[in-house]
Amino acid sequence: LFGTLDAPEPDEILRSNQAFAADPRAHKVNLGIGMYYDANGRVPLMRAVSEAQRRIVDGGVPWPYGPALGSETLRAHLAALVFGEGTPVPVSAQTLGGTGALGMGATLLAEAIGPDAVVALSTPSWPNHAPIFARAGFTIRGYRYLDDAGTAFDREGMLADLAALPRGSVVVLHAGCHNPTGVDPAPEDWPAIVEILRAHGLIAFVDAAYLGFGAGWSQDCAPIRLVRDSGVAMLFSLSCSKSFSLYGERTGCLMIPHQDDAAARGIAAHAAAYARTQYSIPPGHGARIVEIILGDEALRADWLAELETMRGRIIDLRHALVSTLAAEGMGDRMGHLGRQHGLFSQSGLTRAQVARLAAEHAIHAIPDGRICIAALNEGNLGHVARATAEVCRH
Ligand code: LMR
């Protein structure tokens, strides 16, 4: 029956993760899938998350069906956290992580503007962006993002490519900690980007999966607020996976600001219909955890403080990697890793070098050269630097 189906290209991030899991070598390192690990190489259970879980268990909280749009309290807390206390909560839906928010947003857009519109992605972008929008029927186009060296932001290239898009195109923007490159526009670049969106009648789809890992929580929210304040038509996907270390809980949110009451009712009805046919209601546990943290001043402060520590640790790891690579004879060839933001960097390693890292050194990265800096620690950094220098030398 299904023999006629062509197998889609496997996702390289998930494939690398499977290769890591199947690797029997004790010294293996997973620089592939994007997760933050602590100094002991473990995905942390954040203090505030642990306390929220305790309260859930101690409270004997049951798990009835909730509404298709998920927790209204969660959505209000997340809107306040990103857009500021007291700002109106945009029409929104709790989603299955950031990916679920992108999928729901893509479908709502296709229903609203028709799938003939162009969706523009940075070149490169997260490898799941194109399939998500293609599944909703959109034509995908790239916009320039990196300079010729592949290590810094190409402001003029991006602005020119956005200006050349047909009016009504959707532009997917990474709010920060760009995945896969770690290269972000500087704060002073954002007004120009927003002005092009406004002047050319483009729709912004801002994807935020790494808030708090760039320059700090409020600085990381600044571009999102700027787009919102400009009045540009906007969708906003928010993932709690990294910022709360809640990867498997699938907690996220789609927000669509600037809608009058009638439009907001229409969007909410379509979002609820989408949820109902896909998964009925979003999962409750991660949402309840985030809701408890954000609803309690002390817990929220502790969560932000721990997130800030995680951010600082990644910066330290970046500098330690750059200097260890230099000591291994690589000079400043990977100096850009120290200047980039968030969990990832595009290392510049070739596909062949990445394959050798896995085969000869049990170090698993993404074939396009993306490495997860947040997977490094004192115990594996030297091994990673030596092996990287070795595959680059021969
Ligand atoms: C990543 O880019 O590694 C993460 O966003 C995880 C994923 O789902 O791809």
Image: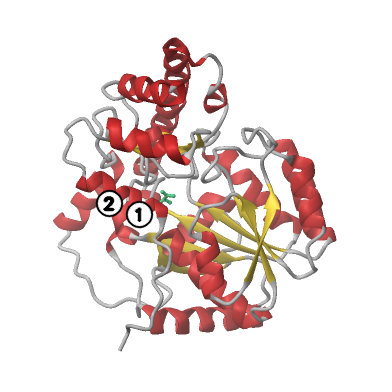
Residue kind at label 1, given as amino acid type: Leu
User: Dot 1 corresponds to which residue?
Assistant: 14
Q: Residue at x 50, y 72 (%)?
A: 104
Camera-side residue of 30 and 203: 30
Q: Assess whether mark 1 and mark 2 are in contact (beta carbons under 8 angstroms).
A: yes
Q: Does the residue labelled 1 lie within 8 Å of ligand 1?
A: yes
Q: Residue furthest bottom?
A: 1
Disc 1 element: helix
Camera-side residue of 43 and 366: 366
User: Dot 2 corresponds to which residue?
Assistant: 18
Say few, some or many: other residues with alpha carbon within 10 Å of mark 1 (under 14 / 14 to 19 / 20 or more).
few
Rendered location of residue 73, percent (x, y): 42, 64
Q: Which residue is drawn at 50% across and 55% down?
A: 127
Camera-side residue of 85 and 329: 329
Rendered location of residue 63, percent (x, y): 22, 71
Residue 305 visible to an observer of this rendering: no
Rendered location of residue 51, percent (x, y): 24, 45
